[in-house]
């Protein structure tokens, strides 16, 4: 348990930062889910639009330190590959 004033403040900051990071991660997952659903439906135009909307949000997660950049680069690459494999 935090005893000094500094450690109490750091505990408060950690709680608020964790909440913000959880919301950011959740938002990224939501955008990823939309892309996955569009890919599963087979609609190339909807999937391309969903991926275009998801990329900036995912990049923001990297900038904010929520997700590692290589992880997101890998995810975007795999989604783009799946999108390009769709007919049409």
Image (cartoon, rainbow, N blue to C red):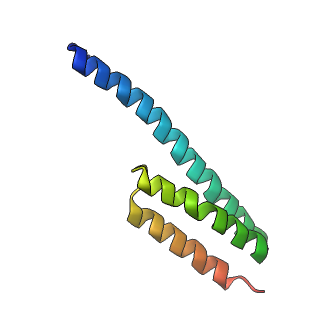
**Left or right, residue 61 beside residue 30:** left
Residue pictured at 52% horizontal, 47% vertical: 25
Where is residue 1? Give x, y as percent. Answer: 26, 16
Q: Is residue 42 visible?
A: no
Q: How many numbered marks are there?
A: 0
User: From what the image shows, is residue 6 above or below residue 83?
Assistant: above
* Quarter assignment of residue 82: bottom right
67 in relation to 79, above or below: above
Tell whether 29 sits left or right of 21. right
Q: Is residue 26 left or right of residue 72?
A: right
* Residue in the foreground of this view, choosing between 61 and 77: 61
Along the viewing direction, whichever of 60 and 26 lies nearer the viewer: 60
Taking the view exactly as shown, the residue that stands out farthest to the left is 4
* Horizontal side, residue 51 vs residue 4: left or right: right
Quarter of the image containing the C terminus?
bottom right
Q: Residue at x 30, y 20 (%)?
A: 9
The residue sitting at 39% across, 58% down in the picture is 68
Q: Toward which corner of the image does residue 71 lie, by quadrant?
A: bottom left
Residue 17: quadrant of the picture: top left
Residue 19 placement (x, y as % from top left): 48, 33
Residue at (58%, 52%) from the top-left corner?
Answer: 29
Is 68 drawn above or below residue 4 in the view shown? below
Q: Is residue 63 above or below residue 73?
A: above
Q: Is residue 87 visible?
A: yes
């Amino acid at each position: 348990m935090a005893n000094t004033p500094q450690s109490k403040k750091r505990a408060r900051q950690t709680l608020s930062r964790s909440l913000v990071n959880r919301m950011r991660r959740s938002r990224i997952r939501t955008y990823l889910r939309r892309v996955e659903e569009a890919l599963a439906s087979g609609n190339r135009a909807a999937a391309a639009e969903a991926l275009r909307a998801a990329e900036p949000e995912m990049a923001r997660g990297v900038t904010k330190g929520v997700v590692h950049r290589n992880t997101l680069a890998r995810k975007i690459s795999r989604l783009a590959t799946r999108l390009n494999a769709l007919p049409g």
